[in-house]
Amino acid sequence: MRKRHASCASIVSVLMLLLTMPFASASGASTDSQVNGFQLDFFQVEGHHSTDLLNLNGTANMPLHAAQWRLFDQQGDADSPPLLTGDYLSSVTPSGEQRWSWTLVVDVSHLNCTCVLTITQDDELHSTRAHINLYIGDTNHRPVLQQPMQSTYLLVGGDLEISIDAITPFDTLDDSVISFTVCEAPNAVCLKEPEPMKMNSTLSDKLHLHLNATTLTLDDGIWKITVVLSDRALTASNPISYTLQLDRNAPVVLLTSSIQQLQPSVGTAEDGSVEAVVYEGEEIFFTAEVSDGYEGESEVLTWSKVSPNGQVSAFSDASFIPPASVTLRPDVAGEWSVILLVRDSAGHLVKTTSTFTVANTAPVAQVFLDGLQIQQADVLVAPTGDSWVLNATKTTDTDNDLTSLRYKWYVDGALIQTQGPVFDSAKINTTGSHEIELVVIDDDGAESRLVFSLDIPQDQVSGSEGMLGSNYFTLGLVFIIGLAGFLLARMGSSEPETSLPKWQRKK
């Protein structure tokens, strides 16, 4: 009797060992979940059937001692509680280097559903989840569509194929029917009610959608496409949705400026005719209007400028008003270009160029004599006995030209000084009327001339013989008169002082 019990115990042990042994990976599909290098495989295929006892197994590349499992009804709401739960797998055993085999045995005899079982492993380093779709019991079974690998697809031209995993209770997709609904959804929400639409599709081991940019009867836009599969028993699957961004055309870019008329761009054309003239230092505004023809489109704008010497540079952050507008103050005369590159989310690139001529601003010569500004053709008389200075430092020009201005001073047609904006009286050593001309020249060769006359009295010329000459008698007489005047001033008999202008124009 004891031998019989021992024999039965051995048979049970062998059966349990067989249940815990993993099937060869080639015998069935696996569901992989990899997060931070973690991997968990099922050895059962999607749509695995079970009635009384659910028996699942697989492998993982880390221990699953903290794994939890949940069994959900596919037709339930997202917030519906699981049909069955468990905090541990039935067994986890090492089966190789960095490899563990696992099993899960659950009594499902009371269930009839199209279900999904999830295994979740959470620890300090990893958080991962694997799932498998199951048919449990004999009723309430329906087809199941898996969400595509991507949530959004882009079609700009040519063909696009989207593959969707699908299972049915009959283990085949033969005689299944596919239906589609479409709505425009730039923000993942339909703007209108979805409408049915026919799309080119085929069924083999998967559902394959074939989209062609030329034959697809949809306008450019962002579309939400919903797919439903009905099996041979006309039972509908769960609906799945994905987003299709259809963009066959490049965006239209309108570049305007404060000096040019509206110019539409054409493709990647780079032509930009010279149409407008501005002056150095004048502020110019450029504004771009971009449209891709549908809601939800997005573009990236890149601005650059080309100076007359051919140097390409970007605009500084301070040049942007909003992102679609920039300002420019050209500081060099010549031909300038502003280039705008627009790239939309579909990869289309549009280049628009605005070219214009910057004219040089000529300097304006300004000369001052002891605070008196000299005008063109003025005639001035220098006061007797004083030195004087002609000051042209207030000559105006654009900021970039001021430091490079050249000054030429002419006296009676002769070039006297070629450097500096200041001209002093020591440069003239003869009396009488002199014509003085100042020529100011900038780095572009533009010049400004100021011509005026200056009368120099005889006593103002250093080293000349004036009206006093060398007559010692006259000098003595002047000395006596001066001494007498000084004594009278000391006695309080001086007259009140009068204020006279230092410089005066001849009338």
Image: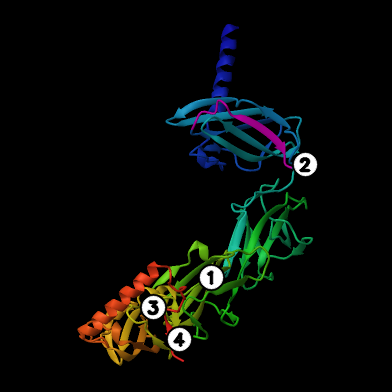
Residue sitting at x 72%, y 54%: 229
In this figure, which residue is indicated by the disc labeled 3? 392
Q: CA distance from mark 3 to mark 4?
A: 12 Å
Please give left or right for residue 17 compared with residue 373 in the image: right
Task: Return the disc, 1 or 3, that comes first in the chain's sequence.
Answer: 1
In this figure, which residue is indicated by the disc labeled 4? 375
Q: Secondary structure under badge 2?
A: loop
Magenta stretch bounds: 62-74
On the image, the x and y values in percent for residue 390 come to 36, 79
Q: Nearer the viewer, mark 3 or mark 4?
A: 4
Residue sitting at x 44%, y 82%: 364
- Viewer-side residue, 318 vs 107: 318
In this figure, which residue is indicated by the disc labeled 1? 327
On the image, the x and y values in percent for residue 56 come to 61, 33
Residue sitting at x 63%, y 40%: 132
In this rendering, is residue 278 above or below 435? above
- Residue 107 visible in the picture: no
The reply to whether discs 2 and 4 touch (Cβ–Cβ < 8 Å) is: no
- What is the three-letter code of the residue carrying label 2? Asn
